[in-house]
Image (cartoon, grey):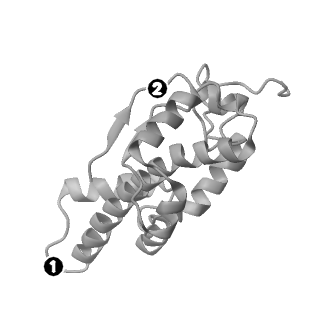
Amino acid sequence: ERYHRLHRLKTAGALSNTFKQLGYNLDRVRSGEADVPRLFLASLPGDIRHIRESSARKSLFFKTVLPLVLRANHEVRMERQRMLSLILQTSDESGLTPAQQAFLDQLAEQYEVPGTDLTELQRRVDVIPASLALAQGAEESGWGTSRFARLGNAVFGQRTFRKGAGLVPLRREQ
C-alpha cells in the first residue's frame, strides 16, 4: 500500500477542505462505498479545540486518525506474517539465521514477552480493531484537544520516562 504524508495543515478548516476535495466521507467508508484515503498528517491542526460543533470535531478527528490506525495495523500485520513464518521455521531442521532470530528477539522486547515464549508472542503481535483504537485515541486525547495531543502529538497518551523528553503534566505531584 502506498501512503501520502500531508505536512501539517495549519487549520481545521484547511484540513476539512482537503478531506472534502478528496471525497473523504465516513458514512461512505462505513457502508463500503469508499476507501479510506491512505494519507496521514504529522499532527492534528492546532485549532481543532476551537471547533464548537462536537460532531464536526469528532468527524475531523476520526478522518485524521483512521488512516494512521489502518497504517499501523498494516505494519503489525506484516510483522505478524513474518513472525509466524519464522516460528514455523524454528520447528523444522533449517533453524533461523542470526538476523531472523534478532527480528524475533526485537519483537519480543517490543511486546514485553520473554524471548522464549513464542505462544505469548503470537498472542500479542496482532492488529487492533480500528474502532477500538479510534475510541481509545478519542478518550485519551479529548478528541484531539488535550494539551498532550496539541503540543506533544500524543493522541494515545504515550508516556516517556526519559528525563527532559516529552511534556510534564501541569498539575503533577513532584
**Is residue 79 left or right of 53 when viewed as pictured?**
left
Residue 80's spot in the image, x, y percent?
35, 65
- At x 70%, y 48%, the residue is 55
Dot 1 amino acid type: Glu
Label 2 vs label 1, nearer the camera: 2
State left or right for residue 113 relative to residue 90. Answer: right
User: In the rendered image, which quarter is residue 84 located in?
Assistant: bottom left
Callout 2 amino acid:
Arg
Which residue position is annotated with label 2? Answer: 8
Q: Residue furthest bottom?
A: 92
Disc 2 residue crowd, few under 14, some 14–19, many 20+, Cα 10 Å: some
Residue 75, numbered circle: none
Q: Residue at x 38, y 43 (%)?
A: 39
Q: Which residue is mark 1?
A: 93
Tell me the quarter of the image containing the N terminus.
bottom left
Q: Earlier in the sequence, mark 2 or mark 1?
A: 2
Helix, strand or loop at mark 1: loop
Asked whether 49 or 17 is in front, the reply is: 17
Q: Position of residue 82 (x, y in %)?
A: 27, 64
Foreground pick, 84 / 134? 134
Viewer-proximal residue among 18 and 108: 18
